Amino acid sequence: MIDILSGIQSTAAALDAERTRLDVISENIANANTTRGPDGKPYQRQLVVFESALQQAMNGTQVPTLRVSGIEKDPRPFEMVYEPGNPDADSHGMVAMPNVNVQEEMADMISASRTFDANLAVVKNARDMAMQVLAIGKH
Amino acid sequence: MLPISTIQPLMSAYGITPGEKISPSLPVTPAEQPGTLAPAQPSGDSFSTMLGKMVEEVNGKQISAAQTVNTLQAGGDVSLHQAVIAMEEANVSFQLMVEVRNKLLDAYQQIMQMQV
Amino acid sequence: MLASVLLNIVRKSRMIDALFNQPDYLAAKKALDAVALRQEAIASNIANLETPGYKRVDVAASFNSELQRACAARDPQEIAALKPQLEVDPNAVPVSPDGNTVSLEDELLKMNQNSLANTLETQLVSTDLYRLKMAITGTVS
């Protein structure tokens, strides 16, 4: 298959990975207060696990590329909050809140967005350069 | 490619026998400057040798350009600019050959129109 | 007749090759090779912006000086023999605790410079080819 924009395979993988990360972050934020999910338990924070694979660069050297290897549940314990009026409170009046720290998620989201936008800029730049190359010899 | 019909009458006019095998050991005269033609010589070998070599070179360039593009299309280890430049160089070479052919034809026609 | 000519002649002649064997033209083509390789390096660096321990790569710094030297020597064979290589940047410093040496602002700056270099070299190559066409056809098309 023709590969006009050569050398940006790692970019495609990174865009994919960051997109997945942003999706997971928005789900975490949306469920930051879900004390009872479909399984009856509080929402457990999800996190994306990356792996680094090697890819062939143009002149034969190997360059690492980022890939999503899976989405896992964060094993950190739920935070217990004293809220006796809550229908999900236990016998002591404590409610188990999802282990989502919204500030942490926001910081993550900013860095994921930044990486996503940067990789998008790489694709656009590669395309602009290819257009110039295709114009060689035309007058 | 270069039409044989224009080369053969021209070469006959210069006393060159068409169809003779061209030996690679014959020197190309004069020094190999791009674009200059060897002056017509009664012996004729250098002229047809030069033409044959030019045709062969141009053909080689076309083939290698086509191969480069094919490798690019198959996703091989060729970058876009290498393919584009190879095609342009093949085009320029071909243009050179066409111009040489045109000039030869003009010269031939001028000669044929001379009053003897 | 032409077929036998093509079969009989070993490719030793240089007539057409001499057209394209000019040092400046060859140097521009080599520079384009380096530009394409650099683009790959920068793409890899930005893709691995957050990979722990990733060390940024770039075209070997020696390539520029080698190309300049070969150009000054006006030696087509020396220029044609050059080959730009990727290497781990020895001057990069870690920007995060996990050892990642990619600074986004730096990479974006280099990407812009590379883009301009691409514009320059493609125009040089284009102009050379255009001049050849003009010389061949005798017309300014």
Image (tube, coloured by chain):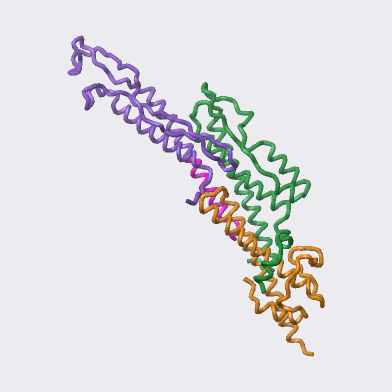
Chain colours: A purple, B orange, C green
Q: Residue furthest bottom?
A: B116
Where does the C terminus of chain A fall, quadrant-wise?
bottom right
Query: In terms of depth relative to the viewer, which is nearer, B102 or C123?
Result: B102
Q: Residue at x 76, y 65 (%)?
A: B24
Q: Relative to A65, say whether B68 is above or below.
A: below
Residue B96 seen in the current view: no
Q: Is residue C50 left or right of residue B39?
A: left
How far from the left and from the top, in percent, is residue B116? 79, 90
Q: Is residue A95 magenta?
A: no
Q: Nearer the viewer, residue B38 or A124?
A: B38
Measuring from the top left, give residue C139's x and y in whole percent.
Answer: 67, 68
Q: Is residue C102 left or right of residue A39?
A: right
Q: Is residue C95 left or right of residue B41?
A: left
Comparing A24 with C1, the one in front is C1
Q: How many marks?
A: 0
Q: Would residue A132 be counted in the magenta stretch?
A: yes
Q: Is residue A109 left or right of residue C87?
A: left
Q: Quadrant of residue C62?
A: top right
Whether residue B115 is situated above or below residue A75 in the rendered picture: below
Residue A26 percent across, percent down from the top left: 34, 31
Q: Can residue A44 be seen here?
A: yes
Magenta stretch, main secondary structure, is helix
Relative to B114, say whether A30 is above or below. Answer: above
Judge by depth and name the residue closer to the eye, C61 or C84. C84
| Residue B114: image location, x then y, percent | 76, 87
Classify residue B110 by image quadrant.
bottom right
Residue at x 42% of width, y 38% of height? A16
**What residue span does the magenta drawing correspond to?**
A120-139
